[in-house]
Image (cartoon, rainbow, N blue to C red):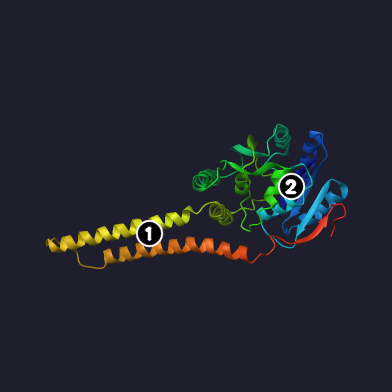
Amino acid sequence: MHTVVVPVYNEVEGIDAFHARCSDAMAAIGDPFEIVYVDDGSKDGSWLKLQRIAEADDRVRLVRFSRNFGHQLAITAGIEHAAGDTVTVIDADLQDPPEVIAEFVARWREGADVVYGVRSVRHGESWFKLASAKVFYRVMRSLSDVEMPVDAGDFRLLSRRAAEALTSMPEHHRYVRGMVAWLGFDAVEVEYVRDARVAGVTKYPLAKMMRFATDGIMAFSVRPLRLATWLGLVVSAAAFVTAIVLVIMRLTGAAVVQGWTSLSVLVLLLSGVQLMTIGALGEYIGRIYTEVRHRPLYLVRELKGFPRREA
């Protein structure tokens, strides 16, 4: 039994094409399967389209959030509602080809608990997106306390025990691909070509990408705090050396330009370092505040297609 988890947010234009292609790809594997769609508070009619799909296909399960909780929490909800021996996460935009899932399953049969897709080619994306993604994955890998694969998104297969281990992790600011790496189960990679989006627009503009990157770094590394400490030490040392040089220049009668330029530069530099340090502390403290409130990760408004579990 295989489960495919599909987070959906305003994908009404392409959901029919995705379902047809994903169903064909899963049927070709030859085992029973289910597709769990998680509607993350869509406002474009995606839920109505999903209901029609579920009425025509009894292998479809639907989870509807009470509002938009975010892509990573939609993935989490889908995994928590999955019944399969394998759980594969894939987006509904058809950039990640469903046909690759068969290769994921083959690697799982060979003993892997995690099979993740590595994007060898990425079509339909701007040079800025490609460059920033490349930099981010390598910076994330260098900062993280766990080994993370580069150029790998959320398109991956989890075994049942890996899926259950992942859902036992309750943090709110979730970086799922990092959390899967933290599990430490046997993992293998499968390279594939990522296609252009079939319809609609990306749901990850620059602002969301920056928040996502921040969540990833803060969730798996305390190095920003160490960096702030070292930066403070470096600036303090530079200020101390500058003070000694100025005193020596004064004692030796060297010409010292009177004015406020050097003082202004030092004040601005020190203020910038202080604000950066406070900002890093604030990010971590904000995450602590979110966790100690113990609010649920998400709220489900409606379930469809789950035997004896419809609400």
Q: What residue would you read off at disc 1?
A: 232
Quarter of the picture containing the C terminus is bottom right
N-term-proximal mark, 2 vs 1: 2
Residue 146 located left or right of residue 167: left
User: Where, by quadrant of the figure, is residue 74 drawn?
Assistant: bottom right
Q: Residue furthest left?
A: 253
Q: Which mark is residue 5?
A: 2
Residue 2 coordinates in the image, percent (x, y): 78, 41
Residue 230 located left or right of residue 25: left
Residue 262 in view here: yes
Relative height, residue 71 to residue 32 (above, below): below
Residue 36 coordinates in the image, percent (x, y): 78, 49
Q: Amino acid at mark 2?
A: Val
Q: Secondary structure at mark 1?
A: helix
| Residue at 71% from the left image edge and 48% from the top image edge | 164
Query: Tag 2: Cα neighbours inside 10 Å, few (<14), some, or many (≥20)?
Result: many
Between 120 and 195, the one nearer to me in the picture: 120
Q: How many marks?
A: 2
Relative height, residue 295 to residue 180 (above, below): below
Residue 209 coordinates in the image, percent (x, y): 57, 53
Residue 186 coordinates in the image, percent (x, y): 64, 38
Q: In this rendering, which labeled residue sits more in front, label 2 or label 1?
A: 1
Q: Amino acid at mark 1?
A: Gly
C-alpha separation, residue under disc 2 versus residue under disc 1 = 45 Å
Q: Secondary structure at mark 2?
A: strand
User: Where, by quadrant of the figure, is residue 116 drawn?
Assistant: top right
| Residue at 83% from the left image edge and 39% from the top image edge | 32
